[in-house]
Amino acid sequence: MHFNDNDAVGPLIVKLEKLAPLSDAAKAKLKALPFTHMAAAADERLVREGDVATNCCLLLSGYACRHKSAHDGGRQIVSFHHPGDVLDLQHLLLSRADHTVQVLTPATYLRVPAAALKQAAQDHADIAEALWRDTLIDASVFREWVLNVGRRDAKSRIAHMLCEFEVRRKAALGGSAKGVVFPLTQEHIADATGLTPVHVNRTLQVLRESGALGRAGTKVVIGDWAQLQQIAKFSPMYLHAAA
Amino acid sequence: MHFNDNDAVGPLIVKLEKLAPLSDAAKAKLKALPFTHMAAAADERLVREGDVATNCCLLLSGYACRHKSAHDGGRQIVSFHHPGDVLDLQHLLLSRADHTVQVLTPATYLRVPAAALKQAAQDHADIAEALWRDTLIDASVFREWVLNVGRRDAKSRIAHMLCEFEVRRKAALGGSAKGVVFPLTQEHIADATGLTPVHVNRTLQVLRESGALGRAGTKVVIGDWAQLQQIAKFSPMYLHAAA
DNA sequence: CGTAGGTTTGACTGATCTCAAGTTTGGTGG
DNA sequence: CCACCAAACTTGAGATCAGTCAAACCTACG
């Protein structure tokens, strides 16, 4: 199922041009990349911790996360991903996956052989720069998560995680924050913040009482965006304008 | 104080060759890099969070760390560094520092203009690959830290952090684990693990009682390396053989 | 409607934090 | 070599945040 219509890799080019200017030759190279359109059901795993990964995935629709497991079975989500994100660029140079990639919702994505993308980066310094910058921003976000999980209390920790999610969602999809529904269960939030689902539940109640958050059925929604950022002491510098 | 003796960048070449094979042309390019020999007193900051950073630092001797501050003043160390490490490769492509770089001990390092190193990477795909791989391993280590801080209890958390430190120290400097003295205060350990110094103190006592750790004056030393790894459930896969 | 997954609640436990003294250590200057 | 000092480490008691376990309760969806 190899297409070569130019539109399919469009989201990749859009993404990379935000990171570094691309020459026409580089864009042509990207358009010539082999790829496969894929669909994933909710909760499907794209890569498993310990696998040898030979593909990179460009998320087209839906949401995904990356997570690791502690020895006792505890799960830690280390990042969330939005449409347009490349999920596993580290597999260009590190073949053994140190974490699992899993979609949260039904999703579609483009699967590109890592070797082909790596070759594109070797041939075009501007492609390499864009991809490299993307991975550096990734690393900056991980650093912030270490701080978030290590040094903030439950309330600001959850608020901070949701702020980041919203800023990145908006960068990918546009729209305004008010009323945004997060595609997350309380268990996802717990796994991302290093808290238990029970404590997340209680903390969300507090955040709802203050109006910072609201609810849409069973899902969390933003109530007051300014207040949520205030509670989180959120400052998006660490995203390096990936936003 | 610009040298051009070939030996000075030797540690950089040694480091990068562990990450990717380098052509002779690439090595020549690295040897021609402009640099300055620097010395830092204990606790000196090389880069401050928020700075525009225009240099990269290759640590020659001594130890360093990177850390971020929470709004309430809480400090979170996000990585430790050993001789041979490049401290801030992210500044090749992200000019604004999202964290502080600080030495732990008196140290010497080579300061290289980021622009020159970036140019070297653009001219030589093998240099780019080695540097990129280094930053990807960095990111993998951050993911492990998120897990460590988010999902392990104080005892295994501290043990895990010390295991990583020792594996990386050994990769940089060689020698055996038994009796290794960590150049860390209990406050450093607390800042790296998201615990308070008081609780670190109490937990270290437990680890000493079991024999996993010992002491040399006021500093922590490894008592029983196998037991320490067992307590941490330490598995070095995430270091991607940076070890 | 029935069901499974997700959420909520209560009561209790426990790990870690806080604050506020001490005590030891390692370096420094006399 | 000793006395002193600052930094680092220890200790205790009490407070709290977050975890555990177990049972209900929703709510989306087939």
Image (cartoon, coloured by chain):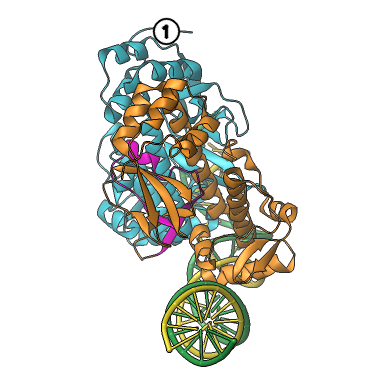
Chain colours: A cyan, B orange, C yellow, D green
Residue A151 visible in rendering: yes
Q: Does A209 appear above or below B15?
A: below
- Is B100 in the magenta? yes
The C terminus of chain B, quarter of image: top right
In the rendered image, residue B128 lying in the magenta stretch gets the answer no
Q: Tell whether B42 sits left or right of B50.
A: right
Instruction: Give the camera-side residue of B88 and B3.
Output: B3
Position of the N terminus of chain B, as image quadrant, is top left
Residue nearest the viewer, comparing B6 with B96: B6
Q: Would you name the residue on which mark 1 appears?
A: A3
Residue A166 at what x, y percent from top left? 33, 43
Residue A33 vs B89, above or below: the answer is above
Q: Which residues are magenta?
A: B74-103
Residue at 60% from the left image edge and 34% from the top image edge: A49
Q: Position of residue B188 (x, y in %)?
A: 50, 63
Name the residue at 59% across, 59% down: B182
Packing grade of label 1 (10 A; few <14, some 14-19, many >=20) is few
